[in-house]
Amino acid sequence: MATALRTEAVMTGPRNGRAAPGEERRPTGWLRATAPLWPLGLARILYGYLWWQQSAWKIPSDDFGRKSGGGLWYWVHEEIQYPTVPAFRDFLVNVMIPHWTFFGWMTLVTETFIAVTLILGLGTRLGSLVAIGMAANITIGILSVPHEWGWTYAMLITFPILFLLTDAGRSFGVDAFLAPPLDRAAARGSRLARVARWIV
């Protein structure tokens, strides 16, 4: 239907949601309507900072809370006490707790990686993919803990899905500088550039 159609610019450079004079325009369905990237860029930076804050209380000198009984140690035991999925509780008890320091470091490194990639907009899609996995892991573990609000974790998963499916790293991000040369290398047949292009 005509009312369901929008026009989309066929961009030759980085997509910013606006067509320069003389650019070809073609009709397209409402699922492909364009929008400016800067709101997604700002959301990406704020979401990355959220992960930076979360990584800050994963403290190696406290053995990630085991010595003090707080921090990551406390929350993992809350997940064990109030399991959402029994198999996940079994994993925490039988695998994570016996190898606590290793998993503490893995948690710290993963959350820091998410924060850095999304704040800088560097390898945004890869950082988003890792964020989806980590957010899903947290959601499964903590959803049944008393006084936790489930929609918090729904949003924790939804935001990186948006970043994964868009060019969120092209606004206020390093990916804006990496994508054009990668596009040119991919056009010349470089397989490595094609893979790297997806990451950014």
Image (tube, rainbow, N blue to C red):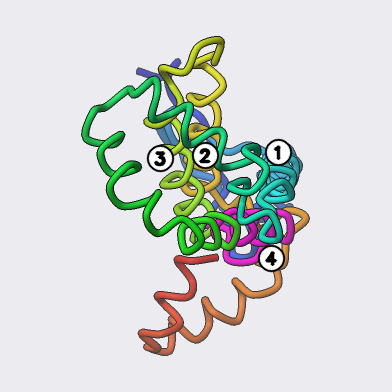
Mark 4 crowdedness (10 Å alpha carbons): few <14, some 14-19, many ≥20: some
Closest to the camera, between mark 3 and mark 4, is 3
What's the distance in space between the residues labelled 2 and 1, CA to CA? 10 Å
Q: Residue at x 44, y 26 (%)?
A: 5
Mark 2 crowdedness (10 Å alpha carbons): few <14, some 14-19, many ≥20: some
N-terminal of the pair, mark 3 or mark 4, is: 3
Q: Which residue is mark 1?
A: 43
N-terminal of the pair, mark 2 or mark 3, is: 3
What's the distance in space between the residues labelled 3 and 4, CA to CA? 30 Å
Report the amino acid beneath label 1: Ala
Q: Position of residue 121 (x, y in %)?
A: 68, 59
Q: Which residue is mark 3?
A: 137
Closest to the camera, between mark 1 and mark 4, is 1
Q: Secondary structure at mark 4?
A: helix
Q: Which residue is mark 4?
A: 176
The circle on residue 162 is 2
Residue 123 inside the magenta-drawn segment:
yes
Report the amino acid beneath label 2: Leu
Q: Is residue 39 visible?
A: yes
